Image (cartoon, rainbow, N blue to C red):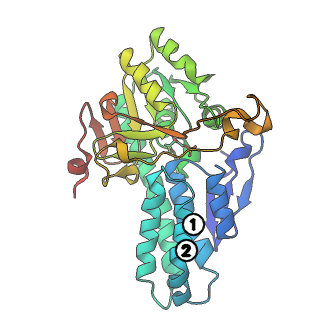
Amino acid sequence: MALPVITYTAGRLKVLDQTRLPGTAEMVELGDLDSVVHAIKTLMVRGAPLIGVTAAYGVCVALLPLTESAQARERAPRVLARLGASRPTAVNLFWALERMERVVASLPERGWREALEEEAVAIHRETKAQDAALAAHGMELLTQGARVITHCNTGPLATGGQGTALGVLIEANRTLGGLHVYVDETRPRWQGAQLTTWELANHQVPHTLMVDAAAATLMRQGNIHSVWVGADRIAANGDTANKIGTYALALAARHHGVPFHVVAPTSTVDLELDDGAGIPIEERDAEEVAAPRGLALAPQGTVVWNPAFDVTPADLIDAIVTELGVFRGPRFDLRSALAG
Ligand code: MRU
């Protein structure tokens, strides 16, 4: 990829504007808190881990211009609240903000700016390292020449590293060879059509785009090795929130005996939730469905329901791949697995 997904140098945060891909690949500077919040809300940056990384740098963008640490400490709660209200489902956002909050709580008088920046950079660095481990562990579940299905976008664009589920597939194609990836277009925001195909092409991975509704038929025709998705929040029992359409894909996979794999760093696991019932699901504007990109598809005034995510019950998941290794279903106890 010619451009990085996110950069932070000398207090300046720049992100690749994902809403303009694949046609235009342009880095945009996010110079204040409003522009960081706007970028997260409008999906200029998106994908659970990248939202966390962006928010951590966003805290720096908002606080570093202040003149002393006492001011930063006083301003921080409002900054953290604004960023925390930008999108509700991906728990990585709250995980990253909690880490920044802990640094704010013990901010030194001298070197306070460096302390904030170091934590944000550490969050980004750890995210990249986790991605590398996800790819290594996920490969255990693939074979040369596998034909797989994926949903939404889970590549480098979604993390600022090498990606989650798509990172596994890109690495498997590079080392094992011969993969073929079937890409759900991923309505209503088209992350599969716009972003995943672009990333697969950039990494020379053979792929085919299809409408979301074609996945079950493809599985019935046989010869699909496995399904690979990311996650926005995973409860302690393995119930997994991910892009809307993931649950239907998992149901079809189970019906056809196709293994269904979730790939996510442990920063996506929410151990405060016993199961998926408590995961907040973002509902987005009606326009995304009724008039995408200004193209009026439905009569004006049509009532729309537009949940951005759904929850796949753990018993439909065959494996959850984390940076710590592969946890296999049908039952998951992530509290015990991640203890210590
Ligand atoms: O609404 P988005 O584009 O932020 O949704 C992204 C997804 O659902 C991804 O599949 C998910 O974040 C997991 S992979 C990084």
Q: Report if residue 176 is visible in the image.
A: no
The reply, left or right, for residue 226 in relation to residue 73 is: left
Judge by depth and name the residue closer to the eye, 38 or 23.
Answer: 38
Q: Alpha carbon of mark 2 to alpha carbon of mark 1: how far? A: 6 Å
Q: Residue 55: image x %, image y %?
A: 55, 63
Residue at 50 percent across and 58 percent down: it is 52
Q: Is residue 269 visible?
A: yes
Q: Nearer the viewer, residue 210 or 6?
A: 210
The yes-or-no answer for disc 2 within 8 Å of ligand 1 is: no
Image quadrant where one finds the N terminus: top right
Q: Secondary structure at mark 1?
A: helix
Circle 1 residues within 10 Å: few <14, some 14–19, many ≥20 = some
Q: Which mark is residue 82?
A: 1
Residue at mark 2? 78
Q: Is residue 235 left or right of residue 125?
A: left
What residue is shown at x 48% (from left), y 8% (from top)?
Answer: 221
Q: Is residue 294 above or below residue 68?
A: above
Residue drawn at point x = 31 percent, y = 48 percent: 324
Picture coordinates of residue 286, whole percent (x, y): 66, 40
Mark 2: which amino acid? Answer: Arg
Q: Is residue 329 above or below residue 322?
A: above
